[in-house]
Amino acid sequence: MKHFSKLISAVEITNKTNDKIAAFVEYFQTAPDKDKLWLIAIFTGKRPKRPIKTTVMKQWCMEVAGIPEWLFLESYSTVGDLGETMALLLPEPTHHIEKTFSHWMQEIVDLKSKSDAEKEGFVRKAWSGLETQECLIFNKLIGGSFRVGVSKKTLVNALAKFSGIEANQLMHSIIGNWDINEISFDDLLQGEHINYDNSKPYPFCLAYALEKDLTDLGDVKAWQVEYKWDGIRGQIVKRNDEIFIWSRGEELVTEQFPELVAAIERLEGDFVIDGEILALKDNAILLFNDLQKRLNRKNVTKKLLEEVPIGFYAYDLMEWNGNDMREQALAERRSLLESLFTAENTSNKTLFISEIITAETWEELIPIRAGARAKDSEGLMLKQKNSPYHTGRKKGDWWKWKVDPLTIDAVMIYAQKGSGRRSAHYTDYTFAVRKDDGLVTVAKAYSGLTNEEILEVSRFVKKNSIEKFGPVRTVKPELVFEIAFEGIALSNRHKSGVALRFPRISRWRKDKPVEEIDTIETVKQLILSPN
Amino acid sequence: MKLIKFTKKGIYCIPGKFYLDPWFPVDFAIISHGHADHARWGMSHYLCHDDSKAILKHRIGQDISVESMPYNSEKTINGVKVGFFPAGHTIGSAQIRLEHKGFVVVFSGDYKVKNDYLTVPFEPVKCHEFITESTFGLPIYNWMKEEELQQKMQDWVLNNQARNRTSVFLGYSLGKAQRLMKLMEGMGEIYVHTAIHNINEAIATTGIKLPATKKWTAETDKKEVQNKIVIVPPALLGSNMIKRIPNAATAICSGWMQIRGNKRWQSVDAGFPVSDHADWNGLLQAVKATEAEKVYVTHGSQAIFSKYLNEIGIPSEEVKTEYGSNEDDTEAEPKSKQAS
């Protein structure tokens, strides 16, 4: 495991992406082929099923380290990661075991069919012969996810640098169907098992935020106006009966959206379309947080498919039966898209075509934009009808015209330490507004504060904790924050009776005393009068 | 009669009529070491170890009334025998031993049991009651050997030099900075921030020899530090002064870096678990060596560590003090005080 451990150390000792890529390239130049295959497998979710329950591992660790459970739990709540907690608690190794990474992986795969006693023997023996860093890796390989601040995209970029093969092709190769025992490292990189011509995506065309006066845009009729949706931008590629879904980050996310693949299968012809993946249930758009549940998962369960169904809003068409359409005018591409997304094809509640808003004057669009929130939209998109499908971000032809966020002033009442890289500080907060003589929670939010502010809030939390419920601290209601959000709706699931869409901290209102926070009544008024 | 009492102003010796590391102004303060949360401004009179005297004057004021004495010597104050023993925390850090009518109390101040080859190594002192810190009082904190740590850090510097990068270490000006200088001795030219330079000068007056350094200020030519080693106080993280350093690779040096998440939360390259406090086993080893019948646990993980001591049969109690401003972002020393 020497090579692998060295790679992980090298990746963790820098926060520069180029250095991380260099460390991977060095690994690809020196490690055995089988190890490299396992590395790719692990980073692409092709990992063996967890052979041992974490509760059992925890029990063994407490025994080996000789500590009581409460002390283990205190340690875990400080570290925020189970595999790392165990690695830190285990005593120093008595000897050193050196096996290749693939050897370890094979042994972990073989554990599945072993007895409980054999599993225990294997883990305890490994722990007695591995350094802290190797122990951590070992624990991570057995269970849980392996996160080292390296995305699939970074791995692909490193492979591209190492091999000289195009990154998107490598993305297809490593995501594609391959078996570690049946393919060589070279064949995997060369894409022997795939046909890249079928999956090759186009760079997305991106819009800038509107920075001009509407009147400077000329005649409103020269523009295609649509709602702007806050989901995951996606590109669907269908060629020779193969279907691929690319995300904007140039990752393949096909397997995460099986219902979308099924809906696309029914469409005739080959094409590449651009659109937005949204979590859609009973004609309502769910929170972005819900949509995120569908990402970064090896398996999308039936339960999850029912809980968070998705829909696709098609924006544009870049390729049609093998012809690159990007230089054609948007109006032409749109009519092709409409011929593909017929009423019949969109009747399944998964595929939709982005609705076009017609207006005679720019003024007519102003109330429509203001009302966008009621449709769970972020605002409007303005696209020049004669524009090509640009490569990347280009100013002038596509504009996003978002609505301003709604805001309320609320007081922090609970705080919790983050997990992973945020585990040292109180970063997750719950906010409340006034209701009668008391307070009622309205939102949870993480982001929006600077590191310095988080330190300051953390210090406040430590000094002003009232109660402790597991990792959650009840704090003196004193710190007031302005919470921004994209929408608000009545909700039976929430104690306050309202659900906020995409809440985040917009600023710390140090100037505001807690007496001046919003009441639940004023918050509810926002539903009735958007903007 | 009781020898000590925990008061709002600090730890008070009843018959001796003096305080240990008080946080409010008092007449007579005995100081364990020069960190700002232990040696505070406003005392009428200070007593500290010989090697801390110049540091106290530098940090609190040249005109303060301060006397000092060496390790393993004794002074009687109002019938209480006061002695200093090495704490191994920073240069001039001392455990304070109090004896009155045969009853002995030892206040640890801050300490580490591992030898850093710079400070006088920690020496356990038998006592009836022991007042211990608990900054790293969780079993996840176990420091690697000094040689292993040095190897890791030097490898990082070598790698930076090979890539034409300047190695920037963040460490408190008193203690951590000198430790880093020692760890980096022989690795090339070492530049230190003015705050560190000034502390180094104060230390030099005691006759202790520190590795050679150059002063790094806002006026220092950017090219001059390229590929070299620069040590700065942590408060400078993210400041323009650090941004001026060409091709910098930055490293936080603190015991908190034992946990991966703590490093990733900061926008730095590397994190090295360099601590001047005792780790979990160090704390246990120190407590056991005192053979104390009662252990008071102060700043850090006091609730956890005292609970554990009680479970293993060592009567213990947690005590609230004003030491260690923050359990997370500093090592017992407030960030703001360091900027000076």
Image (cartoon, rainbow, N blue to C red):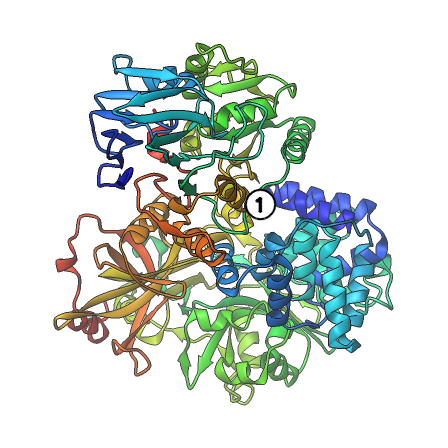
Q: Residues within 10 Å of mark 1 (few under 14, many from 20)?
A: many
A341 and A253: which is toward the camera? A253
**Which residue is depicted at the point 54% across and 43% down?**
B285
Q: Where residue A450 sits: x, y (%)?
A: 37, 46
Type of amino acid at the residue the image marks with label 1 = Asn
A279 and B273: which is toward the camera? B273
Figure check: A275 above or below A37: below
**Which residue is depicted at the point 41% across and 77% down?**
A285
Q: Where residue B158 sits: x, y (%)?
A: 68, 28
Q: Where residue B187 sits: x, y (%)?
A: 65, 21
Residue A410 appears in the rendering: yes
Name the side, left or right, on which A186 lies relative to B90. Answer: right
Describe the element under mark 1 as helix, strand or loop: loop
Name the side, left or right, on which B287 lies relative to B164. Answer: left
A338 and A377: which is toward the camera? A377
Figure check: A217 above or below B328: below
Q: In which quadrant will I find the C terminus of chain A?
A: bottom left
Disc 1: which residue: B142
- Marker count (numbered): 1
Name the side, left or right, on which B332 lies relative to A321. Answer: left
Q: Where residue A85 sits: x, y (%)?
A: 57, 57
Residue A403 appears in the rendering: no
Name the side, left or right, on which A193 lies relative to A473. Answer: right
A440 and B16: which is toward the camera? B16
Chain identifier of the residue bearing label 1 in the image: B
Residue B94, quarter of the rendered image: top left
Figure check: A514 above or below B333: below
Residue sitting at the far front: B101
**Which residue is depicted at the point 41% across and 16% down?**
B50
